[in-house]
Image (cartoon, helix red, strand yellow):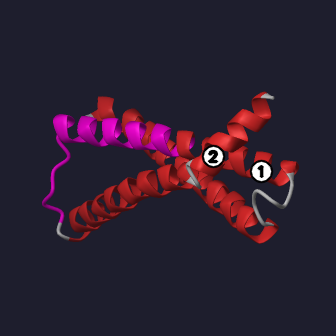
Amino acid sequence: MLVFCVLQLFVIGRHFYVSFLVTVMGLVIPWSLVLVLADAYSVFVKSLDLQRRNLLMIIIGDLVLSFLSLAAACSTASVADLLLDVGKSFCPEKLCSRYQLSAAMAFLSWFLSFSSSLFNLWLLPAL
């Protein structure tokens, strides 16, 4: 009964779990691009100083976005797996496999973002 209620909720809200993943990744991608540009600028021009306050903001941003991407990846993976187990009437196999692939890439994004925040946290006492 509980599985049926959960499935009805996701059928009514038609792919809400994927829109959460898309929204979170829409935040993660620009954040990562800005960090890449700032790092490249600091390497080539050598004039951008890492201050303690700026590095702390980067660490907090990475942590928040990494946990949001973990939550989105977990929700997408679990619902796509649940829909695949129930049957093909709720989710065609090709569509659910795409959802599972996007969840796997979100897990990879989470791992890289979280490791970036841990490395920056390790760098923080040196400043």
The amino acid at mark 2 is Phe
**Identity of the residue drawn at 18% across and 63% down:** 46
- Closest to the observer, 126 or 109: 109
Q: Are marks 2 and 1 in contact (CB under 8 Å)?
A: yes
Span highlighted in magenta in the image = 46-70
Q: Residue at x 81, y 66 (%)?
A: 93
The residue to which callout 1 is attached is 83
Question: As drawn, is 51 to the left or to the right of 111?
Answer: left
> Image height check: is 89 above or below 112?
below
SS of the residue under disc 1? helix
- For residue 23, which quarter of the picture? bottom left
Residue 60 image position (x, y, % from top left):
32, 35
- Measured Cα–Cα span from mark 2 to mark 1: 9 Å
**Quarter of the picture holding the C terminus:** top left
From what the image shows, is residue 4 above or below residue 26?
above
Question: Between 86 and 120, which is closer to the camera in this rendering?
Answer: 86
Disc 1 residue type?
Leu
Give the class, few, some or many, for how many residues have Cα within 10 Å of label 2's Cα (few <14, many ≥20).
some
Q: Which mark is residue 114?
A: none
User: Can see residue 107?
Assistant: yes
Residue farthest to the left? 47
- In this picture, is 86 found above or below 88? above
SS majority, magenta: helix
Examine the image and state in which quarter residue 105 appears.
Answer: bottom right
SS class, disc 2: helix
Left or right: 42 with respect to 93?
left
As drawn, the label of residue 10 is: 2
Measuring 58% from the left and 55% from the top, which residue is drawn there?
15
